Image (cartoon, helix red, strand yellow):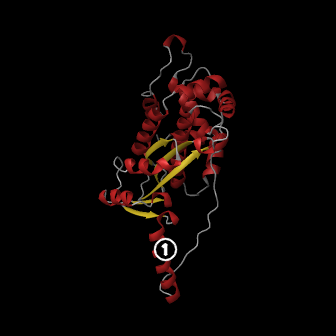
Amino acid sequence: MNYIKEKLATISDTRHSGYVEHNLTDVLIIILCAVLSGLDGLAEIAIYATNKASFFKEKFGIKSIPSKPTFSRILNMLDGDEIAKVIIEIMKERSELLGNIVAVDGKAIRSTSKKGHPHSALQILTAYITESGVVLGQKSIQEKTNEIPAFQEMLEFIDIKGKTITADAMHCQKETCKKIVAGGGNYVFGLKGNQKTLHDDVELFIKSESNSGSIDSFTTIEKLDVIFSEDDCKILSENGHKTLNTLRKLALMLHKQYISKQPKKISIKASLLNCLLDENYLCNILGSL
């Protein structure tokens, strides 16, 4: 518990000291516990915190619970990029699960888009290890097309040696592939019409080889397992969204790590519910930090 408090205490608090009623670290611990319990709406966090007031006082020495407007003000004034840096440090330092598959995924938070401009939504590009959920790097961008240079820049700062990088067809770019190979990694990218010549050549090869029976084909049908209702979150500022987005990633890593040690495996959703209903279970999850 002391570790997470010390790490969160390094985050800058820009509030005027004379008007501060709630310690920033205390507020962030409450929000993290709420997210670990599957909650991320402002109203949900405020209700949860009020109902768990005795728990927070006993376990963390938190003497008073912020109101919903206070949670909103603090989330919106925090530097989302600074929060991300600290949380990613925590994930790298405290993860006990490793892995060699790094997925690069761009997520649009739809509730941030301006009316009539769906492509104006905040985009967060994340590189994470699929087995553990550990985030190696992330970058916020304003337009979907900016993912390509953002990904290429990210590759200069993360360790990909011996890892396989996966991404969608947007990132099937020569320069991106060169950077991955130069970093000692491998890549598996989607291939669509954005690389027409290569796509047509591969399609022709596969069709000809398939007819000869020398290539096995596989079909994977995935079921969309939505853990958090991120698109429904109505926090207006980008900082608030960035902060909650990063805390969700930490929560997923902690749940995966805890579940992996249990003799009987459960789903992440079930683990989130256990945190909400069982304070001892929540403390066990936090105990890995």
- Residue at (55% x, 34% y) in the render: 238
The answer to whether residue 232 shows anywhere in this view is: yes
Q: Say left or right for 51 vs 77.
A: right
In which image quadrant can residue 109 be found?
Answer: top right
Foreground pick, 148 / 161: 148
Count of numbered tags: 1
- Decide: is 133 above or below 178: above
Category of crowding for the residue at label 1, using alpha-carbon neighbours closer than 10 angstroms: few (below 14), some (14–19), many (at least 20): some
Position of residue 144 measured from the top left corner of the image (x, y, whole percent): 53, 48
Foreground pick, 271 / 177: 177
Foreground pick, 10 / 97: 10
Position of residue 188 measured from the top left corner of the image (x, y, whole percent): 44, 64
Residue at the farthest bottom position:
212
Q: Secondary structure at mark 1?
A: helix
- Decide: is 221 above or below 127: below
Residue at the farthest front position:
197
- Residue at (36% x, 55% y) in the render: 160
The answer to whether residue 38 shows anywhere in this view is: no
Residue at the farthest top position:
18
Position of residue 93 measured from the top left corner of the image (x, y, whole percent): 39, 43
Instruction: Give the residue at mark 1.
Output: 200
- Residue at (44% x, 43% y) in the render: 91
Q: Say left or right for 49 vs 124.
A: right
Q: As shown in the figure, which amino acid type bears the numbered disc 1?
A: Asp
